[in-house]
């Protein structure tokens, strides 16, 4: 149980284009999902918390107009990197809490999406 | 300031050589401490959640313990397949959602 998937696993795009990353909870309904960013040899940095049916809460320093988050259903959250630039190249990972499993605070992570902006 | 540190940054062990990884934290109120394993290019895999000082959890060759200031992840007789980065994360009472991740310990187990 508590499986989270991400798509795509890897994407290469040109500078100035937008990229959408999907995060799905496969066997549970997630009212809350999280988006993280990880640079090489560094730990995970929380970008935003996504709540189903409401606006995402962004961490300080994260541009909400650049990183658009939509959590339209209990099993799907999307992160759109708008007008991507090379400095946005990173490993993006989503996670979700499974309210039906204990402990409820535990976050289960997707496999990540490697974004390379040329 | 709330923060999580881990040591050592990297650890090389011979197969069968037991050791411990450390996670130290300073937070205003601990809601829970989480251990994850992360393989290269993959998302973190959940291992344990600890809530209170004195608590211990075990899974195969791994045992996690918790005190008021730190947590240890003990690895007994490790195998090459235990090679990964081990991440510690702390949840705070002031925020149900947010957790702070430590920088991780990169473990290599040599056959």
Image (cartoon, coloured by chain):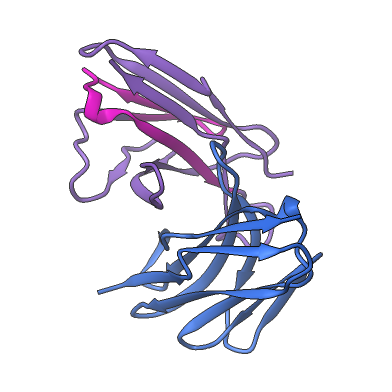
Which chain is assigned purple? A
Residue at the spot 76% in from the left edge and 55% down from the top edge: B111
Q: Nearer the viewer, residue A71 or B33?
A: B33
B57 lies above or below A31: below
Identify the image quadrant of the C terminus of chain A. top left
| Residue B14, quarter of picture | bottom right
Q: Nearer the viewer, residue B45 or B103?
A: B103
| Residue B43, quarter of picture | top right
Question: Residue A93: within the magenta?
Answer: yes
The span picked out in magenta is A69-97
Residue A89 as seen in the image, left or right of residue A60: right
- Is residue A73 visible in the rendered image? The answer is yes
Residue A63 as seen in the image, left or right of residue B14: left
Which chain is assigned blue? B
Residue A30, image x, y percentages? 56, 42
Residue A66, image x, y percentages? 21, 28
Residue at the spot 51% in from the left edge and 43% down from the top edge: A95
Residue B31, image x, y percentages? 48, 74
Residue B102, image x, y percentages? 42, 63
B80 lies above or below B26: above
Residue at the spot 55% in from the left edge and 60% down from the top edge: A105
Identify the image quadrant of the N terminus of chain A. top right
Residue B17 as seen in the image, left or right of residue A47: right
Residue at the spot 23% in from the left edge and 30% down from the top edge: A87
- Is residue A31 visible in the rendered image? The answer is no
């Amino acid at each position: 149980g508590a499986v989270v998937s991400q798509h795509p696993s890897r994407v290469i795009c040109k500078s100035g284009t937008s990229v959408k990353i999907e995060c799905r909870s496969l066997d549970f309904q997630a009212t809350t999902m999280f988006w993280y960013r990880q640079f090489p040899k560094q730990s995970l940095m929380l970008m935003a918390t996504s709540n189903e049916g409401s606006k995402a809460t962004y961490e300080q320093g994260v541009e909400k107009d650049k990183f658009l988050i939509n959590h339209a259903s209990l099993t799907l959250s999307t992160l759109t990197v708008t007008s991507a630039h090379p400095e946005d190249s990173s490993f993006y990972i989503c996670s979700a809490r499974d309210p039906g499993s204990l402990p409820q605070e535990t976050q289960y992570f997707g496999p990540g999406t490697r974004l390379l902006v040329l | 300031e709330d923060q999580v540190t881990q040591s050592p940054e990297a650890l090389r062990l011979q197969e069968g050589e037991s050791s411990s990884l450390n996670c130290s934290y300073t937070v205003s109120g601990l809601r829970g401490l989480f251990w994850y394993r992360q393989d290269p290019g993959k998302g973190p895999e959940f291992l344990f959640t600890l809530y209170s000082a004195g608590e211990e959890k075990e899974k195969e060759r791994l045992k996690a313990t918790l005190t008021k200031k730190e947590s240890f992840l003990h690895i007994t007789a490790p195998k090459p397949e235990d090679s990964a980065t081990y991440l510690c994360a702390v949840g705070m009472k002031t925020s149900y959602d947010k957790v702070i991740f430590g920088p991780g310990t990169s473990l290599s187990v040599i056959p």
